[in-house]
Image: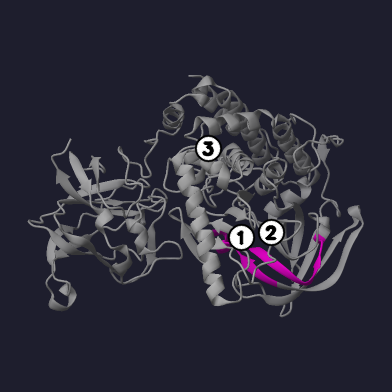
Amino acid sequence: MKKTCLKILFLMFALSVIGLGGCSQKAEKITATPTATPTQRVKGKVTATPTAEVKEVIEEPEDGKMPVLWITTETKEDVTSRDEYIKGTIKADFAKENYFLPETVIDIRGRGNGTWNFEKKSYKIKFEEKLNLLNVGEGKAKKWVLLANMCDQTLLRNYVALNFGASLPGIDYMPACRSVVVYLNGEYRGVYLLTEQIEEKKHKVRLDMSDLETSTDIGYLFEMSYYADDVVFNAANRNFKLKSDLSQNPSLASKQLTYIRDYVEECYTAVRSGKKDEIEKLIDIDSLVDTYLLEETIKNLDCGWDSFNMYKDAGGKLFFGPAWDFDLSLGNGDEGTEYPTDFYAALNLKGQSNLWFFNCMKQKWFREIVREHWNSQEAQRKNAVGMLLEEAEAGYDSYCRNFQKWDVLGTKQSRETAEILNLKTYKEHVDYLVKWMETRFAWLDEHINDERFLSDDFVAWATDMWNETTGDYAVAESGAAIPDATPEKPYGSSAVILNAPAERLEGNFKLLNCYINVSKAKANVPGYTGEDFTNLFDNDTGTKYCTFSYTNFDISFSLDEPRLVTHYALFTGNDTASYPVRNPNSWKLYASNDPKADRNNSWVLISDMFDGDALTTASRRGTGFETIADKPYMYYRIVFENGYDMMQLSELWLLEKTKQQ
């Protein structure tokens, strides 16, 4: 009852904040009261600085309140590629800090995955010589990032999260940042967040690379990401993108990649065992705990999906961080992350849940350390709210002007919920963010110090609270949202018995996917980067096969031997609720025992579905279907007929009905 009341009060606040136009010439002040004075960005401690007096009325915008970057491309044309750099120049001016950078040559390109599709683009810039741009961070660098923050209608979530994370003692490095005004080819482009590039440097991620050309035991920096490209390795059932150098010798480089892959796999095996002594031998616990607390506190929707950085130095342990990418956090996501209540990163709720966090949070000894760290970081949390208010007040006019250029306040850009869409002024968005943070801090403080946090039934308790808030059916130990656990290794040696794994199915079923030879499967249409058809067989509803084509989508695969497939299930994608048109509306499932069935036209039709509404429009949910197979088959083919030019599914399960109870 207490939690329900807290949720209602929060939503009432979000709908009743006062604002007088947000971006008008004279705008009302930021009215939320800081819970502590703003502080400097100091590692592991809080050093108070004087708080600027909050003005009753903010006057018309004045020059010099925020640093300005003037970028000009060599051709005077826009930046249209996120892969290819183009030449240009940059100059910077901030009289308030007596900073001036004369016109300097740069290379510039776009950056981002889904955010690249927005009209306001993010950029990556590269200088010919190292410099400290606008005194951001503790050293010089060639590469810098400009984040557009188009999905965040405060433009402050990345700013707050990066600085909050930097204050936590267990996180050795977080990219420094500051808000800037950007002009591109003389055109005002709005407020951006200038940040350091995450890379191996002595003042960033410090790694010993002295034996790069002679050894495998060197420093490694890498990112867990479903968008991983370039140099990629797979471990712990996830893809990782290497972000540090390998040897120029191809043979040694291959061995180095194998070395770090095997080390990460060894770490994951230790984490799944839950044994403290084994984990401590391989992993820096403080960095894992504080990275968990950062992601849990801000309730980052993407904490298990993308931009999750880790590193290992030569002769050292695995460290977590630097954390990155927080636009879908602090109440700005969906799928339950919009609420300031409940544990999120601690649980295996959805396919993209963070496997490092939810496995460790099963262990009482780990939660004891989490509680100890949490209770020692009250000052950092208070500082985060004060820092937010100070930045919002100081840059208020500049932030408002951004939304005169980009008129998106209260509109759907990404994962905004109804509460966000009801906020029509910049002031309302900042008030909402402040209240969300304060409510989140209070909820976590109460529940981390609850006796049930250290009890053996923590996972069940936390899952029940999640279900009460979201109305979502989550099961503590399930990788997919189904009643019983799926195989921990999807391509293991044995099947698993499921009880009613999907809608329309009743009874017990044997999941046969562990017998699929995924390496020999094929599809006529590849998926987008990180979203290929093999995701249909990875036992993870957080991944998906998403593709575009004007033809049918044809997938074929085989089992290790003929098996009787009495039923099968299709699972919807992670965002089907938002894009239901991507569901296939008709398909045919074929089977054969002829390895040359295509050539010999010997496929047997065992299921023909032509019901356009056969699949649910909820995200990550399965629907089961019966086949007419009368004997075991080894080879299978499913053809989805094109009713729309895009299609997506997260899982395809082959099932055999069994009498086993």
Q: Secondary structure at mark 3?
A: helix
Q: Residues within 10 Å of mark 1 (few under 14, many from 20)?
A: many
Q: Which residues are magenta?
A: 108-133
Q: Amino acid at mark 3?
A: Lys
**In the image: residue 309, left or right of residue 577:** right
Q: Are marks 2 and 1 in contact (CB under 8 Å)?
A: yes
Q: Position of residue 74 (x, y in %)?
A: 74, 79
Of residue 229 and residue 258, the one placed in the foreground of this image is 258
157 w.r.t. 475: above or below? below
Q: Which residue is mark 3?
A: 276
Disc 1 target residue: 220
User: Identity of the amino acid at label 2?
Assistant: Leu
Q: CA distance from mark 2 to mark 1?
A: 7 Å
Kindly identify which numbered label has been placed on residue 207: 2
Image quadrant where residue 404 sits: bottom right
Q: Nearer the viewer, residue 302 or 66?
A: 302
Q: Residue at x 49, y 58 (%)?
A: 262
Q: Residue furthest left?
A: 630
Whether the magenta-drawn stretch holds residue 112 is answered as yes
Residues at marks 2 and 3, CA–CA distance in whole angstroms = 26 Å
Q: Are marks 2 and 3 in contact (CB under 8 Å)?
A: no
**In the figure, 416 relative to 54: above or below?**
below
